Image (cartoon, helix red, strand yellow):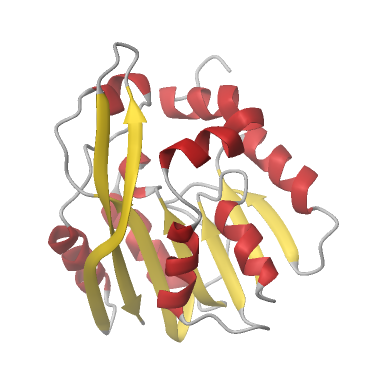
Amino acid sequence: MKGMPSSVRYFEEVAAEWDTLRKGYFRDEVREKALDLAKVQAGERAADVGAGTGFLTEALLGRGLEVVAVDRSPAMLAELTRKFGGRSGFRCMPGETDALPLEASTVDCCFANMVLHHVESPEAMIRELFRILKPGGRAVLTDFERHGFDFFLSEYYDRWPGFSPAEVASLFRAAGFATVEAGPLGEVCQAESSTGIRAVVPIFFVRAER
């Protein structure tokens, strides 16, 4: 793993236990609310960007959608394949958020859950979400609000200390989305530092339609 960015090394190391770790960070209701915001329908094609071990993919498959899961971590992709490789309608692909391995205008809905605070360029990722969506397609992004907990950056290798919903919504508008709404998801992300500092940070959503 020499030469990998710190965040990739981190997720490579925790991939096998990520499902258990994730349950301590935020509830399953996060994905249910995200899917409801997108008004997903069985038979649609969805992209799960920064899919990890398939938190959203699992729910999308359960609702009868075809899913393309994209992640940059080989270990996460291996976990995705182990869990869903035999499921009809599932495919996973390696890829970067600023250059998704999907053709333009090919998905009905796309999701990015807890991904934006890890990417180098939020603007580039959101432009890619716009590119891969069909006209009328929906994007739902969920992430945590701006905070002052430095250990998120030093221990979890976050790139950004969260965001304000309004600033992320403005990026979606700049990318060309026709309608954009943002607000509190009604859920929180919880984490504890190695020194015992406990953080509880609100999660927001942005829903946008191309």
- Which residue lies most toward the right here? 86
Residue at 42% from the left image edge and 46% from the top image edge: 26
Provide residue 123's location: percent of width, then percent of height. Answer: 27, 56
Provide residue 170's location: percent of width, then percent of height. Answer: 16, 66
Horizontal placement of 102 versus 152: left or right?
right
Residue at 17% from the left image edge and 44% from the top image edge: 146
Q: Quadrant of the N terminus?
A: top right
Residue at 40% from the left image edge and 47% from the top image edge: 115
Provide residue 204's location: percent of width, then percent of height. Answer: 27, 59
Q: Quadrant of the C terminus?
A: bottom left
Residue at 38% from the left image edge and 26% from the top image edge: 156
Horizontal placement of 1 versus 131: left or right?
right
Provide residue 195's location: percent of width, then percent of height. Answer: 29, 11
Of the pair 45 and 147, the residue shown nearer to us: 147
Of the pair 28 and 161, the residue shown nearer to us: 28
Residue 20 in the image: above or below residue 187: above
Horizontal placement of 196 versus 81: left or right?
left
Query: How many labels sit on residues?
Result: 0
